Image (cartoon, rainbow, N blue to C red):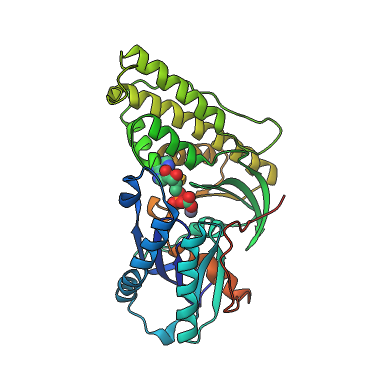
Amino acid sequence: MSGPLILSIESSCDETGIAVIDGGRRILGNVVASQVAMHAATGGIVPEVAARAHLRWIVPVLDEVWADAGIAWSDLSAVAVTYGPGLAGSLLVGVNFAKAVAWVHDLPLIGVNHLEGHVYAAWLLDPDEADRAEPVFPLVALVVSGGHTFLVEMHDHLTYRLMGSTVDDAAGEAFDKVGRLLGLGYPGGPAIGSAAEAATARDRVFPRAWLPGTYDFSFSGLKTAARRVVTEARLAAGLAGDPGTPLPDDVVAELAWGFQDSVADVLTTKTIRAAREVGARCIVLGGGVAANSALRARLAGEAEALGMPLIVPRPGLCTDNGAMIGAAGARRFAAGEWAGLDLDARPSLPLATR
Ligand code: KG4
Ligand code: ZN
């Protein structure tokens, strides 16, 4: 695909992301202002605080992207924006901003599903990256983020059949909760990843919820098991009556490794099974948890054994960003799916049905 030059805006959760994407693939500019440090103070996201931070940063982020991309307004084909799912207040900031830009510059407005963005991140190319093969259909995509965990089958662009999804927590939510239990702060995902890499004892087995006969996932039992194991470890370390003292680093590392191994095992096994059933020609992995190196390595290894390419963006394009919205937005633009200037935010927007 060559062609449309898309200005794309993402503000569904706690990252203000804006990008300029050429032909649905090439990143000309991509800036993300993260609120992670701010939300670390409260141990999680406070929706109103997140919305106000988008309001504060959206114009400076656009200024920076604009300087990087080096294009004129008249070069643009459309403005794409995430309109759901996500936090209502956060979405409203991005949608309203995108409308204003589209109206002022007389550009088509494209509404993009955030989850579709995580899938389409697999198409992106960095500014100086050599061209490489794009994902081919049919494919199976696993999206693992802070709010969602699901497997979809795609036989063509923009068409999704839901194969399975979490019946309780999202994988990222489980990482964040267990990170908190281990005293690793917010967000738990990256912290568990680094703690696990330092683990010397790699034999702790956490439970796996297989939910046989389905492609669904469940992480709440794993979270309960982690709570029990942390309590036992604190007792064993003589810290039961001393909540202010953290567990020793080597124990945290061992438990982080065991938890991560359980999540990576279930996600990989089900994804590979789904890919075989569908006769997929490739597997796409996306969403914040796809930044996890153990999951990436495990899925890459098993996909390679099947002779099936795994396409996973670099970690910075797995977590929320504007570029992925431009990649998906370019496809919607090409399909003539333009939104009206009455586009509304849809906090519970679904991606696919079974
Ligand atoms: O896709 P994302 O940036 O935002 C949502 O759409 O939810 O995903 C955020 C989630 C958080 O739960 C975070 O802890 C997790 O992705 N995450 C990771 C890693 N980096 C981010 N989880 C495991 N390992 C990582 N390296
Ligand atoms: Zn996301």
> Considering only vertical position in the picture, is 237 above or below 41?
above
Between 199 and 115, which is closer to the camera in this rendering?
Answer: 115
- Residue 170 in which image quadrant: top right
Q: Position of residue 327 (x, y in %)?
A: 50, 66
Q: Position of residue 190 (x, y in %)?
A: 37, 41
- Residue 248 in which image quadrant: top left
- Residue 192 in which image quadrant: top left
Q: Quadrant of the N terminus?
A: bottom right
State how many labels appear. Answer: 0
Between 228 and 105, which is closer to the camera in this rendering?
Answer: 228
Name the residue located 50 percent from the left edge and 77 percent from the top edge.
99
Between 4 and 84, which is closer to the camera in this rendering?
Answer: 84
Between 55 and 60, which is closer to the camera in this rendering?
Answer: 55
> Considering only vertical position in the picture, is 253 above or below 331?
above
Name the residue located 38 percent from the left edge and 62 percent from the top edge.
52
Task: Name the side, left or right, on which 339 lies relative to 174.
Answer: right
Name the residue located 51 percent from the left edge and 72 percent from the top edge.
80
Task: Name the side, left or right, on which 341 lies relative to 31.
Answer: right
Q: Is residue 312 visible?
A: no
Q: Position of residue 135 (x, y in %)?
A: 55, 57
Name the residue located 31 percent from the left edge and 14 percent from the top edge.
237
Q: Is residue 201 visible?
A: yes
Q: Position of residue 219 (x, y in %)?
A: 55, 33
> Considering only vertical position in the picture, is 182 above or below 153?
above
